[in-house]
Amino acid sequence: MKVDPLNLLFNEGAILDKKFYFISGNEITLMEKIFSFIANKYKKENFQISKIDTIENFINTNGLFEDKKIFVSRGCKGINRENIDKIKKQESSFIFLQENSPKNKMIKNFFNKDEDSYLINCYELNKNEKTKVINEFFKNKNIKIPENIFWYLTDKLDNRYSLLEGFLDKITKLGQKEIKIENINKLLTIDDVNKDKIFFSLLKNHKEIVSVYREKVLSTSDVNELYYYCKYYCQLIIDSNNIKEYNDKIPKYLFKEKSLLIDVFKKYNQKKKKLLLNLLCKTEKALRKEGGLSLITGLRFVLSIKRITTS
């Protein structure tokens, strides 16, 4: 059945007891936010998150007294009615993340009709959805803002979820007495957009990477946003077995960066992929423990990716 992503995010009491979660769309930051929300819910119930490449010929090797698992696949390889019917008998649940493509239309239709599934489509926010996010954000922070500023933010802020959330986080740091249009405009004029482009500087020298980082990353919310972008791009590398598979997974809107991304992928073997996965796990633990990453930790994270890539 289809579920609205924002309704899910803003419902802390949401009961997640489905067998399948299919997260799709074309807004990567919202897809990753939904994935983290679902994964964290299961982790609180002592589930272990495990990655799989495909559900074809899937066998759960868990013993009776082993940890409960939820399996994650970043793609729709192997998804068909026969394989789904087989794994429905498993006790575990499954999360699938797949950007929109003609190949997954029939798959999405299947999960939409299945009562034991959530189909979660993630797209850039429209105006009504942005007002919902902004309203919910300030309500949770116990901050009241003038109506004129509320609608000003709705018009001015980005339609992508993590960029919107990151900017709202900056506004809260102004303090309630400083939430004025002129102060918001000062924040808007800062050139901190396209932070994900830092990842595309991996093959440049350290000095250039540090320069771009200091220009684009100005707060802990910026670091967190950058981390999720880098995590997504790194996961594509880790989950791809060859160049063709990787090329097919690169989002269409990154057509200008495709050749660079392929050059990065060519530098990876299984050993480097393991190092990259360990780095992601270590950084993720720090993020959860501290509630965010510091500016220096974010820079070390980016430079560590570069070191692994070019070593």
Image (cartoon, rainbow, N blue to C red):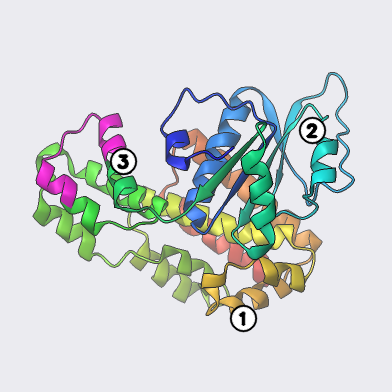
Q: Which mark is residue 142?
A: none
The residue stretch that appears in magenta: 135-151
> Which residue was labeled with disc 3?
132
The amino acid type found where label 2 is placed reads Lys
- The image quadrant that residue 139 belongs to is top left
On the image, the x and y values in percent for residue 84 come to 79, 41
On the image, the x and y values in percent for residue 240 come to 74, 62
Identify the residue shown where x is 64% and y is 64%.
102
Whether 91 is among the magenta residues is no
Sequence-wise, which precedes: disc 3 or disc 1?
A: 3
Q: Which mark is residue 259?
A: 1
Q: For the residues marked 2 and 3, what is the alpha-carbon distance in whole angstroms?
A: 35 Å
Observer able to see residue 303: yes
Label 2 SS:
loop
Label 3 SS:
helix
Whether 136 is among the magenta residues is yes
> Which residue was labeled with disc 2?
88
The amino acid type found where label 3 is placed reads Lys
On the image, the x and y values in percent for residue 284 come to 57, 43
Label 2 environment density (alpha carbons within 10 Å; few <14, some 14–19, many ≥20): some
Identify the residue shown where x is 47% and y is 22%.
13
> Could you tell whether 184 is left or right of 241 in the image?
left
> Could you tell whether 163 is left or right of 148 in the image?
right
Instruction: Determine whether 42 is above or below 165 in the image.
Output: above
Instruction: Determine whether 174 is above or below 7 in the image.
Output: below
Label 1 SS:
helix
